[in-house]
Image (tube, rainbow, N blue to C red):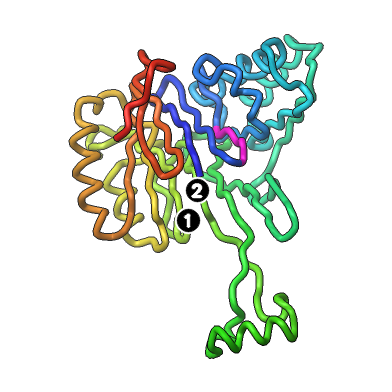
């Protein structure tokens, strides 16, 4: 599982998730940062229609149309059904690009509607949207990435490994095991702290954290750090927490806070990362690090 994330609250937010070639949100500047890598994006999932989450769509669509790359690949844009801001913006982009040289699929989706990313034999991975509360009147989603897995049926749990192996040979795997869907990733979008029932069982949680200090929040449109952490402590199976959409007012405090949280949650087996508003975060092959935005293309700082 690999990520490239940029998030500066109010200005721009986007999350690139590989190996599925999925983009969550498309804030301003994404094409500038990714360059021809935009051709690798297969699916876009928009959380809501605020400008800092959709302004980069036009550049993304236009870059794929005019830069040097593979135009045989379709681009599918999934977004909350009946979100007028997104619909109006996509309509404008379509009218301004009447002769696209690749297929663009616009797919309005509803909560619970499953979008398959990859199916190969018994392997299936999909995305399911869920509603979140952001600003009044704004239809907003978070997203789960699910992977279909298999586990031993309860009635065979008392058997030894050898007995299970013999039973599989005799009856087949489908007789001995059952499928279930595992949440391997949850992306919050802009919202209050997601309840335990939503994040429980997710291996990686990418959660907005606009406010480090609860006293700075006005209204109930964004999450506060303490609320997120309380719910993460109560939930089970979370292995990795990535906090993004952090207000720039906390820029000078993030390094110290990151170290403190990493030390606290190491005992619980949870790895914590914070996306600095001035950094471009990457997580690749278990290695975490940042690009300073002024140095993109000029080296990587590994943390």
Please, what is the dominant secondary structure of the magenta stretch? Answer: strand
The stretch in magenta equals: 20-24
Residue 294 lies in the magenta stretch: no
Q: Are the residues flagged by discs 1 and 2 in contact, CB closer than 8 Å?
A: yes
| Above or below 228: residue 55 | above
Q: How many marks?
A: 2
How many C-alpha atoms fall within 10 Å of the one at disc 1: few (<14), some, or many (≥20)? many
User: In the picture, residue 37 is in which quadrant?
Assistant: top right
Left or right side of 74 for 79: left
Q: Position of residue 267 (x, y in %)?
A: 24, 59
Seen from the viewer's position, the closer of residues 217 and 182 is 182
Q: Which residue is drawn at the image coordinates 68% and 45% (left, top)?
A: 117
Label 1: which residue? 202
Residue 22 lies in the magenta stretch: yes
Label 2: which residue? 186
Left or right side of 96 for 142: left
Cα gap from disc 1 to disc 2, whole angstroms: 6 Å
Seen from the viewer's position, the closer of residues 58 and 1 is 1
Q: Which mark is residue 135?
A: none
Residue 167 appearing in the image:
yes
Left or right side of 212 for 23: right
């Amino acid at each position: 599982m690999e990520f490239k994330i940029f998030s500066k609250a109010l200005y721009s937010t986007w999350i690139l998730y590989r190996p599925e070639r999925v983009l969550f949100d498309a804030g301003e500047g994404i094409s500038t940062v990714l360059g021809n890598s935009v051709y690798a994006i297969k699916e876009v999932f928009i959380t809501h229609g605020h400008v800092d989450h959709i302004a980069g769509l036009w550049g993304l669509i236009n870059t794929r149309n005019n830069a040097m790359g593979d135009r045989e690949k379709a681009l599918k844009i999934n977004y909350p059904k009946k979100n007028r801001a997104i619909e109006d913006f996509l309509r404008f982009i379509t009218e301004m690009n009447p002769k696209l040289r690749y297929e663009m699929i616009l797919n309005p989706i509803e909560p619970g509607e499953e979008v398959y990313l990859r199916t190969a034999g018994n392997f299936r991975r999909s995305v399911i949207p869920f509603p979140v509360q952001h600003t009044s009147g704004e239809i907003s989603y978070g997203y789960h990435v699910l992977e279909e897995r298999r586990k031993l049926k309860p009635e065979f749990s008392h058997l030894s490994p050898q007995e299970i192996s013999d039973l599989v040979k005799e009856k087949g795997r489908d007789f001995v095991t059952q499928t279930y869907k595992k949440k391997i990733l949850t992306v919050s979008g802009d919202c209050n702290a997601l309840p335990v029932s939503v994040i429980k069982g997710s291996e990686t949680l990418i959660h907005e954290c606009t406010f480090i200090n609860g006293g700075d929040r006005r209204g109930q449109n964004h999450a506060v750090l303490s609320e997120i952490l309380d719910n993460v402590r109560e939930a089970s199976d979370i292995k990795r927490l990535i906090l993004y959409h952090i207000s720039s007012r906390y820029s000078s405090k993030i390094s110290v806070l990151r170290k403190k949280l990493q030390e606290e949650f190491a005992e619980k087996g949870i790895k914590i990362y914070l996306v600095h508003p001035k950094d471009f975060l990457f997580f690749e092959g278990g290695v975490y690090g940042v690009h300073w935005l002024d140095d993109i293309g000029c080296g990587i700082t590994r943390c």
